[in-house]
């Protein structure tokens, strides 16, 4: 599909479809996944990819690539909503957590720069929504994302995580919408 044939917000508005971009930020690879969700909550795969950041000469240039590449993807695919994974620091050392936080910050800045708010999900929450248990392994996420979106073959782990984040947001917004509960008030109750 070329950028000229990608349905924009106007075409999706006619069918009440919402386009959701999921982002799995990382300092070496950042996953991006995009799904369209209809009013009944059915999700359809639109796009996924992994931004490989390792060819940059410095960490600062990796952050710039995240910002620039996500900005270009936002302009190209025109999501209505964006979701991102929260930083999880259980097994990582302090330096890794700081780098991950900086990568996440670059991603958030790209999203906000393009006029979007951002929805945040913990890794456990994403695993629970997609696999059914919060301690799921990467391979289980890759498999279930493929099943849920009807994708053949193995999906790269970071891209699969990004699609899982988009699916989690789609499921959460659909469920809360049916229940008549705002996401903000739902978060306060937890």
Image (cartoon, helix red, strand yellow):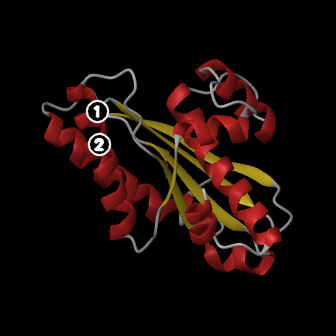
Q: Measuring 58% from the left and 36% from the top, which residue is drawn there?
A: 124
Residue 45, percent across and down? 71, 47
Residue 74, percent across and down? 46, 61
Label 1 neighbour load within 10 Å: few <14, some 14-19, many 20+? some
Left or right? Give the position of 44 relative to 87.
right
Quadrant assignment for the C terminus: bottom right
Which residue in the protein does label 2 denote? 101
CB within 8 Å, label 1 to label 2: yes
Which residue in the protein does label 1 denote? 97
Label 2 neighbour load within 10 Å: few <14, some 14-19, many 20+? some
Q: Is residue 5 above or below residue 15?
A: above
Q: Measuring 20% from the left and 32% from the top, which residue is drawn there?
A: 56
Judging depth in this view, the residue of 177 and 190 nearest the camera is 190
Residue 36, percent across and down? 70, 59
Judging depth in this view, the residue of 169 and 10 nearest the camera is 169
**Of all residues shown, which one is farthest toward the right?**
40
User: Can residue 80 be seen in the rendering of this structure?
Assistant: no
**Element type where label 2 sits in the image:** helix
Residue 158, percent across and down? 50, 31
**Element type where label 1 sits in the image:** helix
């Amino acid at each position: 599909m070329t950028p000229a044939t990608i349905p924009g917000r106007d075409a999706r508005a006619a069918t009440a479809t919402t386009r959701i971009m999921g982002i799995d930020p990382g300092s070496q690879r950042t996953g991006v996944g995009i799904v369209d969700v209809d009013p009944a909550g059915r999700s359809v795969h639109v796009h996924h990819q992994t931004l490989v950041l390792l060819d940059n000469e410095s960490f600062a240039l990796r952050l710039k690539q995240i910002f620039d590449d996500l900005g270009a993807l936002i302009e190209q695919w025109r999501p209505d909503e964006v979701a991102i994974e929260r930083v999880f620091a259980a097994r990582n050392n302090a330096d890794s957590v700081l780098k991950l936080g900086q990568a996440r910050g670059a991603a958030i800045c790209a999203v906000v720069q393009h006029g979007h708010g951002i929805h945040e999900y913990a890794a456990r929450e994403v695993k629970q929504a997609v696999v059914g248990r919060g301690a799921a392994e990467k391979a289980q996420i890759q498999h279930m994302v493929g099943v849920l979106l009807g994708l053949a073959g193995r999906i790269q782990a970071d891209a699969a995580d990004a699609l899982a984040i988009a699916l989690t947001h789609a499921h959460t917004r659909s469920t809360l919408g049916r229940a008549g509960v705002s996401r903000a008030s739902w978060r306060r109750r937890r």
